[in-house]
Amino acid sequence: MVWRGQAEKSLKIGWIGPLTGPVRLLGAENERAIRMAIDEHNQAGRVWVEFLVEDDQYQAERSVAAYKKLRDWGAKVVFLNTYSAMFEVAEMARKDKVVIVNSIDDDRELGRLEGQVFLVAKETEDLAQMLAEDMLRSGRE
């Protein structure tokens, strides 16, 4: 869908998380929900939001590379769901003036990050329960 004024008024938002690999369940629904919200926003004819998704397979080094790609693309907001990458990426984002949103983790360590870091989830430990339940349901141990 092309919206009038799209080229002049757009906001670039990136998303980094696992879409493949053993913990893809942490990423697929999260990315889909954000995409749905952006599509709804764009259909309302507000400032156009461009959305770019990067699969990091929940590996910090892939997250960092994906962040750099999104930053160079011009993203001003990046959703990052890989816990181990948050610390390095948050430092880069602070210098780059990029907002980082983690929508699945929240704990004391992440709460100490400086800059424009937003944590919008339950405690990180709740993820362990979710992963364990998924493993049991799918027969993985």
Image (cartoon, helix red, strand yellow):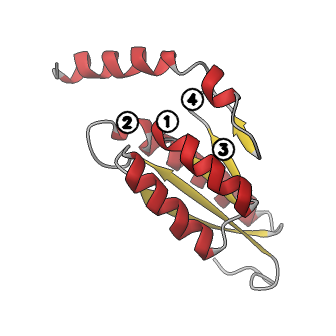
Task: Tell me where residue 62 appears, x and y as whole percent.
Answer: 39, 55
The residue that appears at 69% across and 28% down in the rendered structure is 111
The residue that appears at 76% across and 81% down in the rendered structure is 6
Comparing marks 2 and 1, which lies closer to the viewer?
A: 1
Task: Tell me where residue 12 appears, x and y as whole percent.
Answer: 68, 68
Query: Which amino acid, mark 3?
Result: Val
Comparing marks 4 and 2, which lies closer to the viewer?
A: 4
Name the side, left or right, on which 61 lies relative to 77: left
Query: Which amino acid, mark 1?
Result: Tyr
**As drawn, 125 above or below 4:** above
The residue pinned by badge 2 equals 25
Query: Which amino acid, mark 2?
Result: Leu
* Element type at mark 2: helix
Comparing marks 2 and 3, which lies closer to the viewer?
A: 3
Indicate which disc residue 91 carries: none
**Residue contact between numbered discs 2 and 1, judged by CB atoms under 8 Å:** no
The residue pinned by badge 4 equals 105
Please report whichever mark, 2 or 3, sits nearer to the chain's N-terminal start.
2
Of the 4 image quadrants, the one containing the N terminus is bottom right
Nearer-the-camera pick, 82 or 92: 92
Please report whichever mark, 2 or 1, sits nearer to the chain's N-terminal start.
2
**As drawn, 102 above or below 132:** below
* Residue density around tag 3, few if under 14, some if 14–19, many if 20 or more, within 10 Å: many
Comparing marks 4 and 1, which lies closer to the viewer?
A: 1
The residue that appears at 45% across and 53% down in the rendered structure is 63
Q: CA distance from mark 4 to mark 1?
A: 7 Å
The total number of labels drawn is: 4
